[in-house]
Amino acid sequence: MLKAFLHLLDTRFSFLKETPLLLAVSGGIDSMVLIDLCQKSALNISLAHCNFKLRADESDADEHFIGKIAKTHSLDVFSTSFETETFAKTTKQSIQMAARQLRYEWFETLANKNGFDYILTAHHADDNLETVLINLSRGTGLDGLTGIPEINGSVVRPMLGFSREDIYDFAINQKISWREDSSNKSTKYLRNNLRLTIIPLLKQLNPSFIESFQTTQNHLKDTQSILEDYMLEVEDRVIESIDENQIVYNIDSLQSLNNPKAYLYQLLKAYNFSDWSQIAALLDAQSGKQITSVTHRLLKNRSQLILSPLDTSSKVSISIEASDEIVQIPFQPYNLKVDISTSLEVPTKDHVYLDFELLQFPLRLGNWSHGDYFYPSGMNGKKKLSKYFKDEKLSLLEKENTDVIYSGEDVVWIVGKRADQRFIATKSSKQILKLSIEHNAHSQE
């Protein structure tokens, strides 16, 4: 096994050499073998251990064991503990998913703080098989059938090619000590049930089942690679525009594809949607219809589908004083520049000139309300903001992202769109307040 591991380092994981590595270790046989392999390969490793406080004294004993191993081998070790059950209840997750979130977030924090380029885990071929069977039992696509990725960002799993039997034989042969997790014997968890009942049966029916499974996965990954290349071409055809706030898809282009539902799945699967029939129906739905996932929204806007992240933080109300120079605007790709002068220039959408004496300070920048109205510059009479937005054919997303500046309760400027006639500076204005949109550099790229 060591020879095979060294070959992998030379051919597929050469980037792990001569760089600081953080090993996620539990004390179980898999992670203890990974420590041994890395040391015998002269890799620069430190250890990270999570105590999830799920098995009382047994969990503490695991932590103590890892500490002894680190001391014996002169390795740096990082340890932390979590109130996993409490976190799972608070976040409404299963214990396994809560533990996964806690440990990976902590690993990333450790890596960033201490300069570790990669995080190594001891996942192996049987873990991969269990994951695919779980995905299959819940319904999955090609991604779910390809299983655990060898490399996912900074996380690397160099043992995915080895079976549980390979690891056990190596541990016995090299006299490697490890800790047994008593919870692994419980069949109340789906993964354990597969490990203890289903997979042994599959191996009994076909002693080479793991090897056959890995061959199938390699074929699926090849197919996935072809599909990903093709989807890049499809994206060029169906995406009208893309920026940091949204992706706009052309519905006519989507409907011209054979089986739009299948393409929508490939285009949107990374955004946590689940009801693909409902998403496909959005193509023919009324304008304004929308579907949300836990992270994103997909909006039908006339001949477009607009994908945008959900704003989980409510927009704040910003005060603007006459003495301000630059006002930072959270969640927007611009800041606001404030100038006081006596000169009057031609206004644009990005610049507005206001009569200073007519304004009540501090001005307020914030969300608009459906009852708000203003007197549009260049027009007679007043108009509700909701009616103005409708006339301007703004999408729901554009309406929500529009800021409004108020003087007291009165609308002064729909930022970047239209000023209120009542506050616009004239040649007779003694003092003029100039408000200017300054786009952030990255918004112009």
Image (spheres, rainbow, N blue to C red):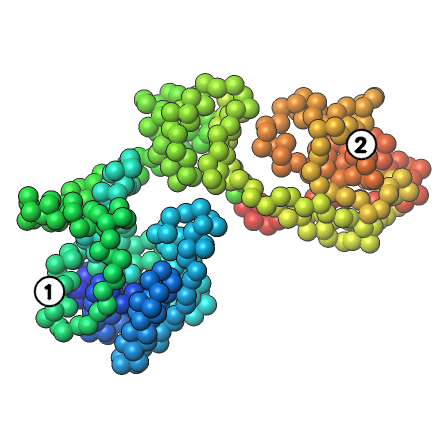
Left or right: 272 in relation to 372? left
Foreground of the two, 101 or 38 = 101
Foreground of the two, 125 or 329 = 125
**Image location (x, y in percent) of residue 355:** 87, 40
Query: How many numbered marks does the figure carry?
Result: 2
Q: Amino acid at mark 2?
A: Asp
Label 2 and label 1: CA atoms lie apart by: 79 Å
Please give the name of the residue rendered at 54% of the width and 21% of the height, measured from the top-left corner. Answer: 287
**Image location (x, y in percent) of residue 304:** 50, 25
Left or right: 162 in relation to 134? left
Residue 169, disc: 1
Please give the name of the residue rendered at 23% of the width and 68% of the height, measured from the top-left corner. Answer: 179
Q: Amino acid at mark 1?
A: Asp
**Image location (x, y in percent) of residue 28:** 24, 65
Circles 2 and 1 in contact, beta carbons < 8 Å: no
Q: Which residue is mark 2?
A: 420
In the figure, 72 relative to 282: above or below? below
Secondary structure type for disc 2:
loop
Secondary structure type for disc 1:
helix
Residue 404 appears in the figure: yes
The image quadrant that residue 142 belongs to is: top left
Disc 2 versus disc 1: nearer the observer: 1
In the figure, 221 relative to 392: above or below? below
